[in-house]
Amino acid sequence: MSSLSKTIENIKLENIIEKASLYIDDKEQIKIIEKAYNFAYKKHSGQYRKSGEEYIYHPMNVAIILTSVYADYETISAGLLHDVLEDCDCTDEEMEEEFGKTITKLVQGVTKLSKINFSTENEYLIDYYKKIIVGMSEDVRVIIIKLADRLHNMRTLWALSEEKQKQKAHEALDIFAPLAHHLGIHRIKSELEDLSLRYLKPDVFYDIAEKLNKTKLERDRIVYDMQEEITNLLNEHHIPHEIKGRSKSIYSIYNKLDKGKKFSDIYDLLALRIIVNTEQECYLALGLIHSKFRPLPKRFKDYVAMPKPNMYQSLHTTVFGIEGYLFEVQIRTYEMDEVAENGIAAHWAYKENKGSKSSANLTNTTEQKLQFFKSIIDLSHDKMSSEEFVNSVKDEVLNNNIYCFTPKGDVIELPKGATPIDFAYKIHTKVGESTIGAIVNNNIVPLDYELKNNDIVKINTNKSSTPSKEWLNMVKCSATKNKIRAFFTKNDKELYIEKGKYSIEKELRKRKIPFNDFFTEENMEQINKSFKVTDFEDIYLGVGNGKIPTNSVINVIFKDKEAEAAPKTVKVTSKNIDADIIVSGIDKVKVNLANCCNPVYGDEIVGYITKGNGITVHRINCHNLEMLEDRTIDVSWNTNINKRYSSCILVYINDSENHMLDLIQNISLTNVSVDGIKVINRGDKSVYEINLYVTGLEQLNKLILVLNKNSFVEKVERTIR
């Protein structure tokens, strides 16, 4: 048995209880942790891991990691139970009966994540992000447990094949370490990165480790002397403090070497962390250190006044220390240090141990700590394609953001490239919709101005103003784009509803059907049921946008009565059996398909009796019919005909790229014939007018569905000239 396995087996329940008791005072909560251990021990009995040890030692190690970041008792309990639902004979109901809804939901969340085939390949990223966000939206603690689970798996990665080692290392580096970073859990992030590098580039990892060991004695001496200097300086000015050397992670050194730096040029290998009691003492200590040791220009960062999005706070400076060596110095309070090391999980520690430190401050900033997750949840609620969603998460949430200010000093977090319109919508949707201009740093700027870090932005509004569709080309945030689109969709919807209502009432007047006879509660329910909608407003909308023929709505109620009164249709004879269209009551007549709306087999149609040119057949929603008054006649498609029909569609593109080849490839997938393509340029956008030959409405609708799936396609519609 390996020494590592022995180390794992030496972990006992007492170790978990001892660590949890350091910050959890409630004895009942400690008992629940013990109960969770006993339950998991019983369920995992007889199970072993690939590394050779009994399975129970994995959840125990997960629990130990969770105590190191001050997770609450529910999180630790769920950590002990996290594999029980997936790997053991246990139902959700049994667990809920034993541990209640909250702990069970945490375990269910981790179980969902465990079923995902995490990968750094693009096709898997889509499923990964969508499913992981569901876990986040339920409870952020699910992710903390998953991070602890992955960290312990990385510690025992030696038990897997080399191929699996590299796969898991890539996942840890590309997916889990960034999540730990945005949660502010430095200790998990740093260890995940180092372990990943060890398996992905072992030569580089051990080379850096060896160089660090060779210079360790010299570095330790210099760091000790510098500590003494700063300690004496702070003591002279009566500032209570704690000071310690800070080790640089191997992965962070690798990153600097990878950017072309030499090992000897990495000046922040020498690092100190100074911990004081108050925020005021942070700045006092900084001033004293700068008065004695010359600071390196452009290396000062104030994350106390302007915390990072994961609520990391600290003062950073680099100074020329003793013997001319450069030192990176971090200054923070004890509270800031806990949050910096343990991240968002530390919040529960302060909540449990209210007397030890200022829990009120952390409680008040909990919402800010959760900003990262709320950003992702907001994205998942917006309607967008999978590709748009993944790009949004990567670009807007996982990448570096900028921070701008309102005139009152409120911080607004935005992705790089954001404009004043994004800023306005971030404040409130109503502010965004009524924006008419922007002033940045006391200068008037255009609405497509690219905001910079620390810009002070004032938005000018007008209550009567509304968004412009041009804004869609200016904004960066996907959430902003979707809010702008939603505004126009809502406006269009209202117009379509009015149009639909007018069309139905016009047809009722034409048929001389009293409104009171038609608009009864019973009739409206029958129509809703017929078209499978829940609200009659949806009927108006369908009629208004052309998806539901007006006659079809009225015929649900009055078709039979009209059929009794109408003259009987003459049977179709052999003379017209080969015709496309069957005309009610007429054996032989010249019939043309209207060029204005290009009806195809399957469309709802109506005939128009022309003067001297037979009957022209239109789609039922053709706007030209409104001018044709009462010279219409019932017609229907001949089901015996098997031919192709001419049709025309407009494909609206949301960029200025040439997508002709993409469109032709898409069309070829549906076996539709192309007769011609014309491009209409509209500034940054374009519209393709495509003439087609299709077998009928079914094939045409399939083509429209295929085209709409492309990210570059804004919409597709059939033409009515």
Image (tube, rainbow, N blue to C red):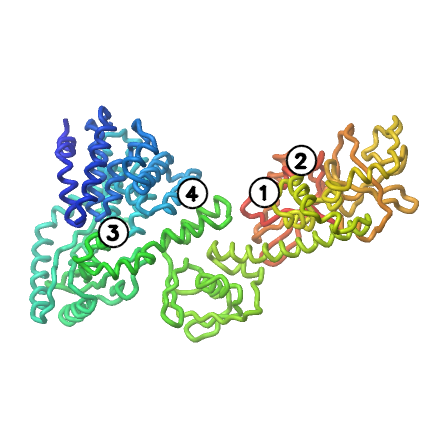
Q: Is residue 158 left or right of residue 418?
A: left
Query: Which residue occupies 87% across, 44% down?
Result: 609
Q: Of tags 2 and 1, which is closer to the observer?
A: 2
Disc 4 marks a residue whose amino acid type is Lys
Query: Label 3 sits on what residue type?
Result: Trp
Residue 293, quarter of the rendered image: bottom left
Q: Secondary structure at mark 1?
A: helix
The image shows residue 120 at horizontal and vertical percentages of 37, 40
Q: Which residue is mark 4?
A: 130
Front-most of 141 and 201?
A: 141
Q: Which one is in front, 477 or 325?
A: 477
| Kind of element beneath mark 4 | helix
Disc 4 versus disc 3: nearer the observer: 3
User: Can residue 690 be seen by looking at this rendering?
Assistant: no
The Cα–Cα distance between marks 4 and 2, rounded to whole angstroms, is: 32 Å
Q: Amino acid at mark 1?
A: Asp
Q: Position of residue 361 (x, y in %)?
A: 25, 61
- Counting from the top left corner in percent of width and height, residue 240 is at 10, 65
The residue under label 1 is: 662
Q: Which numbered disc, 4 or 2, marks the residue closer to the eye?
A: 4
Q: Earlier in the sequence, mark 4 or mark 3?
A: 4
Task: Report the Cα–Cα distance between label 2 and label 3.
Answer: 58 Å
Amino acid at the residue labelled 2? Gln
Q: Disc 3 and disc 1: Cα gap in Å?
A: 52 Å
Give the number of the disc on residue 699: 2
- Crowdedness near tag 2: few (<14), some (14–19) or many (≥20) residues, C-alpha within 10 Å: some
Viewed as shown, does residue 634 lie left or right of 424?
right
Q: How far is disc 2 from disc 1 in space, using C-alphas? A: 19 Å
Using the numbered discs, state the Cα–Cα distance from disc 4 to disc 3 in whole angstroms: 27 Å
- Residue 36 in which image quadrant: top left
Q: Which mark is residue 348?
A: 3
